[in-house]
């Protein structure tokens, strides 16, 4: 795994999609994400994410990470304000999430406004600089 990370950093990979399992090997998405220095867009697939996972990941995330895509994950976070506090300590500008309850979406967007753009499946027709945000 160390050689994989070394190569990622060597070749300036900017977008990385991490499935939780690949070829019967369990991939630690948060370990990879915190050890890559050049990844600007991280896509996490098939992970069950808790607040503790986010706490560990966001406390050591690469400063170059600007776009965190959790659309294809399951999120179990009860304290949305603790989650937003963690996010605000990073350089993340865009956060893509799975469908959430309307109250949670409202709290997220209110707390993160002007700092992090929250993207949800219902935002699929929105664009930034001519690029579709959700495919």
Image (cartoon, helix red, strand yellow):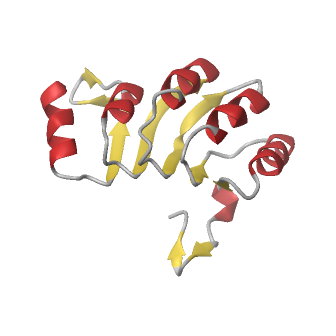
Say whether residue 117 is left or right of residue 28: right
Q: How many marks?
A: 0
For the point 50% across and 75% down, the residue is 131
Q: Nearer the viewer, residue 76 or 89?
A: 89
> Residue 111: x percent and y percent?
80, 45
| Quarter of the rendering occupied by the N terminus | top left
Q: Which residue is at a point 42% across and 46% down the rendered structure image?
A: 42
In this rendering, the answer to whether 92 lies above or below 125 is above
Image point (40%, 52%), residue name: 40
Query: From this viewpoint, which residue is outermost toward the top?
Result: 52
- Counting from the top left corner in percent of width and height, residue 108 is at 77, 44
Left or right of 59? Residue 62 is left
Which residue occupies the foreground of this view, 106 or 59? 59
Query: Residue 10, image x and y in percent?
Result: 15, 46
User: Residue 43's x, y, as percent?
Assistant: 43, 46
**Residue 119 in view, yes or no:** no
Viewer-proximal residue among 28 and 67: 67
Vertical side of 104 occupied by 79: above or below: above
**Is 89 displayed left or right of 80 in the figure?**
left
Q: Residue furthest bottom?
A: 130
- Seen from the viewer's position, the closer of residues 60 and 32 is 60
Q: Residue at x 58, y 74 (%)?
A: 128
Q: Can residue 70 be spotted in the picture?
A: yes
């Amino acid at each position: 795994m160390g050689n994989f990370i070394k190569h990622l950093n060597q070749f300036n990979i900017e977008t990385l999609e991490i499935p939780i399992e690949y070829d019967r090997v369990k991939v630690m998405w948060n370990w990879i994400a915190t050890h890559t220095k050049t990844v600007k867009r991280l896509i996490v697939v098939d992970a069950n994410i808790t607040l503790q996972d986010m706490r560990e990941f966001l406390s050591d995330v690469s400063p170059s990470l600007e776009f965190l895509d959790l659309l294809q994950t399951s999120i179990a976070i009860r304290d949305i304000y603790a989650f937003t506090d963690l996010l605000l300590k990073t350089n993340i500008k865009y956060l893509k999430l799975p469908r959430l309850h309307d109250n949670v979406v409202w709290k997220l967007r209110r707390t993160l406004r002007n700092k992090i753009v929250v993207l949800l499946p219902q935002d699929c027709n929105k664009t930034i600089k001519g690029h579709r945000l959700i495919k």
